[in-house]
Amino acid sequence: MIERVSLFNTKRDFLLFLLISSFILFYSLLIEYQNFQQLTRFDSQILEATVIKQYEKTSLSTKKKSKTFQILKLKSKEGLTFYTGAKKSLENIKGKIVKLEVWAGKISFYEYLTSFYAYSKIKYIYKTPTLKQKINSTISSSHVNQNISNIYQALYTAAPLSKELQATFSTLGVSHLLAISGFHLGVLSALLFFFIRPIYTFFQDRYFPYRNSKLDIFLIISALLLSYLIFLDSPPSLVRAFGMLLVGFVLYDRGVKIISMQTLFLSVILLLVFLPKLTFTLGFWLSVSGVYFIFLFLIHFKDLNKIWQFILVPFWVYLLMLPFSLAIFGNFSIYHPLSILWTTLFTLFYPISIFLHVIGFGNLFDGLLESLIILGQQSSHVELSYNLLALHVTLSLLSIWKKSFLYILLTFNLSFFIYAVYHVT
């Protein structure tokens, strides 16, 4: 068997890659800065944007009087994400496209790259439903419970979950299943391969036997996944997964090792230099962390039996991602460790649920999901300080080089897991 080579064989190769990446990053930031100047050139700009979230907020005025208004989270066609306020009486326009005048002249370049709040005035609300709205309406028609509809909309169209459902699923430790990411992309890739391969083979045998079937099928699947990515407005975690899919195939096709930190490093750097806004996106870094811990296990325990690797990886990822979950959400329950089981079963649930919605039986799992929501109501707050989270990240990075740090990391996380369980029992 031919041994696969490493990505960077010398320091010179690595430094050359960093130099080229720096030039690309500089050019990407230059483009973003020009867009920023265009946005802030005048006191106001007319933008078209999709309303991602809409919720009420109450605050005190300078005269100590409470005032209730609505907050809108929007994403423009140019990929700009920002918040604005609206009257309390504004109708529900979540998911709709609006034309508005935005006063963003005083924001900084950093705020532009992350997200910002700007005053605005809605000029027009487009009444014609988008394709995404039509799909979400079809999903809603299959369910009586609005929470269940919201779950499936999050799974299929990346619609944001309500705050109540976010808290519920963070308590159960399955928030990652409701945010479309590499896990979903992997399942979709497998489904597409299952359906496309026999069709492609049929035509290849008769008309173009000289073609490289692996390359052609990969290009077809990639085109379909890219279309889905654009349709979903490019969620950061999905962008990471799609980027790694492309980089991974190119490297694999050229005989380079895929399961290595160099591959992950290359993917992350390329994504960040071409899309620098990802640097400030939490979902992107959580997605990267999940892959990092999988690679960490497969690198250090590469000699372990494949069956044991398959069994232990879900437990490993759960344990090492736990500090991030608690630091961000702070919710924990006695059912939280069962997320390992839910994650495994989700591999079957996801494609089956898609099929059931297509044939008109999308409500078949409603009772199960309602029971799951009830379980998520019983939660306790387990606080994780940022100092402990920083220690976890430091040990995780050191574990690349020495296995002793890996065992310290594992002991640290096991101790914290035991403390969390003790805290809720």
Image (spheres, helix red, strand yellow):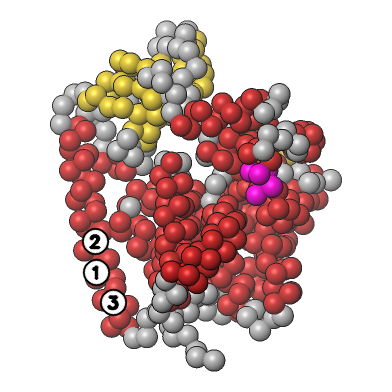
Q: Which quadrant holds residue 330?
A: top right
Q: Which mark is residue 20?
A: 1
Q: Which residue is mark 3?
A: 15
Which corner quadrant holds the C terminus?
top right
Left or right: 187 as drawn, with respect to 128:
right
* Amino acid type of the residue tagged 2 in the rendering: Ile
In the rendered image, the residue lying farthest to the front is 206
Does the rendering let one see residue 15? Answer: yes
Secondary structure state at the residue bearing disc 2: helix
**Residue at the location (78% across, 46% down)?**
335
User: Disc 2 marks which residue?
Assistant: 24
How far, Cα to Cα, is label 3 from label 2? Answer: 14 Å
Location of residue 75 with respect to 9 vertically, above or below: above
Q: Amino acid at mark 3?
A: Leu
Q: Is residue 262 left or right of residue 303?
A: left
- Residue 325 x, y percent position in the rendering: 62, 49
Residue 59 is a magenta residue: no
Q: Main secondary structure of the magenta part?
A: helix
In the rendered structure, does residue 353 fall within the stretch colored magenta? yes
Give the crowd class for mark 2: few <14, some 14-19, many >=20 residues within 10 Å. Answer: some
Residue positioned most to the right = 425
Which region shows up in magenta? Answer: 351-355
Judging depth in this view, the residue of 36 and 419 nearest the camera is 36
Residue nearest the viewer, comparing 44 with 401 = 44
Crowdedness of circle 3 by 10 Å Cα count: few (<14), some, many (20+)? few
Report x, y in % for residue 154: 57, 38
Q: Amino acid at mark 1?
A: Ile
Q: Position of residue 247 (x, y in %)?
A: 41, 67
Q: Secondary structure at mark 3?
A: helix
How far is disc 3 from disc 1 in space, using C-alphas?
9 Å
Q: Are marks 2 and 1 in contact (CB under 8 Å)?
A: yes
